């Protein structure tokens, strides 16, 4: 299972994306989530799609690995596509099956929304694939540092998010081990009625929750043993440095936004 996980997993490399400041990556992700909604036709989606694959190329993350990691969300993407196909009534009628009528506008909107969803997942996954969890914590804490003035526990919140990302692959790996152990004892998770499948999952959840709480307790004890008392008065061993590549990434993002805004009217 670990080989198919992309979210929450870090892949070490020496790519340009890996060397970027984590603050620049976070700003890039936040901006991209808004920019992707500017795409509304073939030209804009082709442009933002090419831009996304350029980022993947620069990150040196294998496209086959990314596509393999998207398999768990393909069902949701297909559901979104067919939802628009069957319920969006815009444009000319393409075909009709009894009471079911499929419109051209529904198919086009379904394709565009599905592409938008996939692009968002690809780009956001690159954040964790190219950035160590501790760097994500430092970046979040630095970006939201001004909120400390109004007594917002920025350091603690950033640490919680980093730990959550770090333990996603660990919990999935633990789930895979428990499922294999229970299959060896005769458990069946893939056949039978829905009620039987739900009943088969219950014995899986109990040891998974026990393992998760045990890991959380071990982590808390380890942090206390090392003198962790929150972010107050802490110094930084790793200093974040904004470089020219980070500035260029922001410039390219502004250029992309302007191009999408111009092309969306065609």
Image (spheres, grey):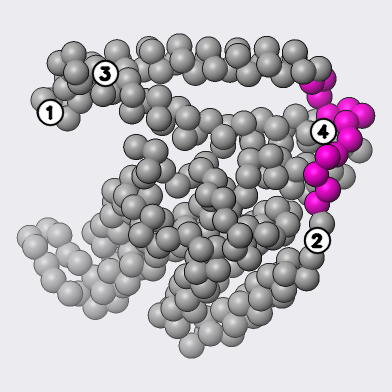
Q: CA distance from mark 3 to mark 4?
A: 44 Å
Compare residues 258 and 62 and report the one nearer the observer.
62
Q: Earlier in the sequence, mark 2 or mark 1?
A: 1
Measured as percent of width and height from the top left, residue 43 is found at 45, 83
Q: Which residue is denoted by mark 3 in the rendering? A: 181
Measured as percent of width and height from the top left, residue 237 is found at 83, 40
Q: Which residue is denoted by mark 2 in the rendering? A: 242
Indicate whether 257 appears above or below 218.
below
- At mark 4, the secondary structure is loop
User: Circle 3: is it few (<14), some (14-19), or many (20+) Cα within 10 Å?
Assistant: few
Q: Earlier in the sequence, mark 3 or mark 1?
A: 3
Q: Which residue is denoted by mark 4 in the rendering? A: 152
Q: Nearer the viewer, mark 3 or mark 4?
A: 3
Residue 83 appears in view: no
Measured as percent of width and height from the top left, residue 251 is found at 71, 75
- At mark 1, the secondary structure is loop
User: Circle 1: is it few (<14), some (14-19), or many (20+) Cα within 10 Å?
Assistant: few
Label 3–label 4 contact, CB within 8 A: no
């Amino acid at each position: 299972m670990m080989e198919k996980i992309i979210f929450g997993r870090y892949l070490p490399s020496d790519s340009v994306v890996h060397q970027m400041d984590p603050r620049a990556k976070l700003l890039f992700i936040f901006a991209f989530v808004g920019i992707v909604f500017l795409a509304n036709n073939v030209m804009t989606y082709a442009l933002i799609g090419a831009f996304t694959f350029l980022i993947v190329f620069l990150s040196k993350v294998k496209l086959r690995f990314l596509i393999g990691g998207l398999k768990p969300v393909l069902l949701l993407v297909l559901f979104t596509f067919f939802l628009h196909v069957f319920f969006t009534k815009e444009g000319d009628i393409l075909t009709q099956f009894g009471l079911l009528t499929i419109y051209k506008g529904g198919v086009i909107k379904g394709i565009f929304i599905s592409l938008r969803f996939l692009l968002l997942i690809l780009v956001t996954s690159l954040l964790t694939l190219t950035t160590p969890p501790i760097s994500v914590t430092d970046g979040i804490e630095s970006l939201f540092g001004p909120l400390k003035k109004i007594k917002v526990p920025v350091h603690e919140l950033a640490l919680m998010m980093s730990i959550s990302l770090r333990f996603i692959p660990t919990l999935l790996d633990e789930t895979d081990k428990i499922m294999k152990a229970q299959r060896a004892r005769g458990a069946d998770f893939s056949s039978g009625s829905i009620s039987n499948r739900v009943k088969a999952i219950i014995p899986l959840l109990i040891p998974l929750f026990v393992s998760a709480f045990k890991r959380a307790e071990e982590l808390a004890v380890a942090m206390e043993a090392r003198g962790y008392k929150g972010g107050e008065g802490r110094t930084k061993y790793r200093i974040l440095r904004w470089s020219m590549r980070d500035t260029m990434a922001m410039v390219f993002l502004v250029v992309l936004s302007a191009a999408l805004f111009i092309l969306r009217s065609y």
